[in-house]
Amino acid sequence: MSRYVAPDRDLGLQGHYAGICTRFAAFVFDVLTIVFVYDLFARGTEYLVSTLSDEQFRLSDAPIAAWSLLAAWAIFYCSYPVAAGGRTLGMAVTGLRVVRPDGTPVGGRQAVVRVLALPLSFLTLGIGFLLILLRQDRRALQDLIGGTAVVYGWDARAARLRFLARNEPD
């Protein structure tokens, strides 16, 4: 049984502004990744410090340090991959890419500003995210502040070629 691939639709969507559902899925994936990797780091640090000092150490005993480390990790995780390749891991999984409004790649400054502006979308009681539904270019508040846009950016042509190669008769 072969699966149907819609190459015309997939190719046609590339470069179009991403919708709220796809962006939300990428966001959830990224949040889970941030928390998982941070938890691994925190547990490793607790074990290492406890072993070296012969005293029980818990990062949760220093909440300011714990939250600062989490915030620094989240900022790095969300800005560095966007600056380097236009997407976080969650965006790569869902086929999204962050670009400038003209379609060119974003720089490091834009990526950091975009990440630092993200909490404003939450602080406005979600109105910053509601802009994705209200604006024709589907840019959220953090996109407007950071000078970015989120578009569909998977490699549909390569995926179609791989699909066709798998389904070729011998």
Image: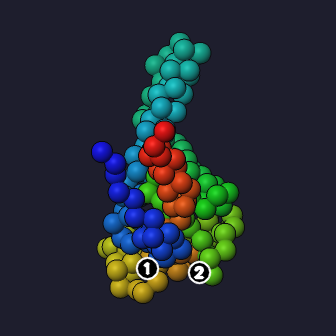
113 or 32, which lies in front? 32
Q: Residue at x 61, y 54 (%)?
A: 81
Where residue 100 sits in the image (x, y, percent)?
Answer: 62, 76
Which label is found at residue 71?
Answer: none
Q: Residue at x 32, y 73 (%)?
A: 125
Q: Is residue 124 visible?
A: no
Mark 2 nearby-residue class (10 Å; few <14, some 14–19, many ≥20): some
The part of the image, by quadrant, that contains residue 133 is bottom left
The reply to whether dot 1 and dot 2 touch (C-beta < 8 Å) is: no
The kind of residue on which mark 2 rests is Pro
Residue 28 visible somewhere in the drawing: yes
Residue designated by label 2: 101
* Residue 1 or residue 152, whichever sits in front: 1
The quadrant holding residue 120 is bottom left
Picture coordinates of residue 17 (x, y %)?
Answer: 47, 76
Q: CA distance from mark 1 to mark 2?
A: 11 Å
Q: Name the side, left or right, on which 88 lies relative to 28.
A: right
Which amino acid type is marked by label 1? Arg
Residue 34, position as x, y percentages in the image: 47, 46
SS state under label 1: loop
Residue at position x 69%, y 64% from top? 108
Within-10-Å neighbours for mark 1: few <14, some 14–19, many 20+: many
Report helix, strand or loop for mark 2: loop
Colour scheme shown:
rainbow
Location of mark 1 (residue): 138
Q: Nearer the viewer, residue 93 or 45?
A: 93
Horizontal side of residue 2 vs 82, given as left or right:
left
Residue located 55% across and 47% down the image: 73
Say which label, 1 or 2, has the lower sequence index: 2
For residue 18, what is the image quadrant? bottom left
Quadrant location, the N terminus = top left
| Outermost residue to the front | 170
